[in-house]
Amino acid sequence: MKKPAALPMRSRVVDDKSLALGRQRSLWQDAARRFRQNWLAVGGLIVVIVFLVLAIVGPHIAPYDFLEQNIVKAFQGPSAEHFLGTDDLGRDVFSRMLHGARTAALVAFFTTFISLVIGILVGAWSGIHGGRIDELLMWFSDLIQAMPGLLLVILINTTLRRPVINAFDQMYMQTRNPFFLNTLWLDYVLVFSALALIAWPGLARLIRGQVMSINEEDFVLAARALGASEWHIMLRHVVPNAMGPLIVAVTASMGGAVTLEAGLSFLGIGIQPPNASWGSMLEEGRRLWQVFPHLMLIPAATIGIIQVAFVFLGDGLNDALDPRRNS
């Protein structure tokens, strides 16, 4: 029987590359298919996209200035002129909601980004090295987690804000630089820092657990045997393989950051006027909710919907990207 002719070497290389690309495309196609089948995740994605789009373009398409007051039109219900009605000062609620969306998006993104960077560095470093470094870092994270998170954020905001403002006033008196007169951005910096401080320990522990389970896998041992550095192993092998649970934690953290910022502003220690915040709108509507419930229901419902959407999105992405799922 005549043997089939062997393929040229170049053809074999091309076939191997095509097979690898086909497998890669198939994995992403399977993940997309699983995600589309999860209608809760798709709904969460749509809500998050709408939220982010409104946060970017909302202040530019707002029909009114969110600070514009008109006492004559105070306490109006939803109408063609004012889509969501007006508040006690005659300000357009819809315009204020659009500006508040930008505040919520900024807090969610920067808080999660800061806590994620710290959590990945601390958790991965602790899980790879172990020993005394692991004990020290985990002891410090346990110390932060043992403190009541909301009370810690309140403590940071209330103790740091006034000294920083006083320092800026003194610097203005010395330099006459108008930059030191604008302290509106200070509210954002304090909120970002305080919320990231209480969020990173949970992410660090999650990364540490994933690293310790992945650290003994064959591909990690092979990379270490080939002389790869710990940083290369961490960034190239460990962190990408821990992305599933991390995605869920990050999306939940973004939704939680929106809620925590609203809670701080509701208490009067978060984003301060004239900056817009859904939490401050909640506090303003609380005093009149029995007579004009829409002033409180609109921001409260928006915050709840966005947080649930982030949770559904994170769960859906985790299920879709999990290679062990066969559905």
Image: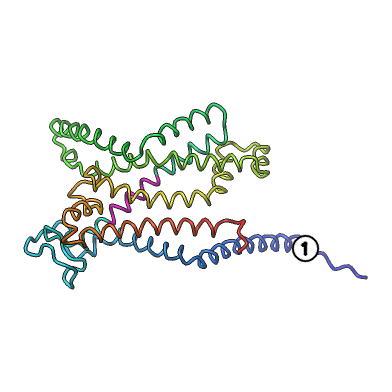
What secondary structure characterizes most of the magenta part? helix
In the image, farthest residue toward the bottom:
80
From the viewer's perspective, is residue 294 above or below residue 221? below
Identify the residue position indicated by label 1 in the image: 8
Where is residue 256 drawn, in percent x and y?
37, 49
Where is residue 214 drawn, in percent x and y?
61, 43
From the viewer's perspective, is residue 111 above or below residue 306? above
* Quarter of the view holding residue 290: bottom left
* Apparent side of residue 201 relative to residue 83 in the rendered image (left or right): right
In the image, farthest residue toward the left:
72
Where is residue 293 drawn, in percent x and y?
20, 61
Q: Which residues are magenta?
A: 101-113
* Apparent side of residue 92 relative to residue 43 in the rendered image (left or right): left
Query: How packed is label 1: few (under 14 Cα within 10 Å), some, or many (20 or more)?
Result: few
The quarter of the image holding the C terminus is bottom right
Q: Amino acid at mark 1?
A: Pro
Where is residue 147 drawn, in percent x and y?
37, 34
| Element carrying mark 1 | loop
Nearer to the camera, 306 or 217: 306
The quarter of the image holding the N terminus is bottom right
Nearer to the camera, 297 or 239: 297
In the image, farthest residue toward the top:
132
* Quarter of the view holding residue 238: top right
Determine the residue positioned at 28% across, 55% down: 102
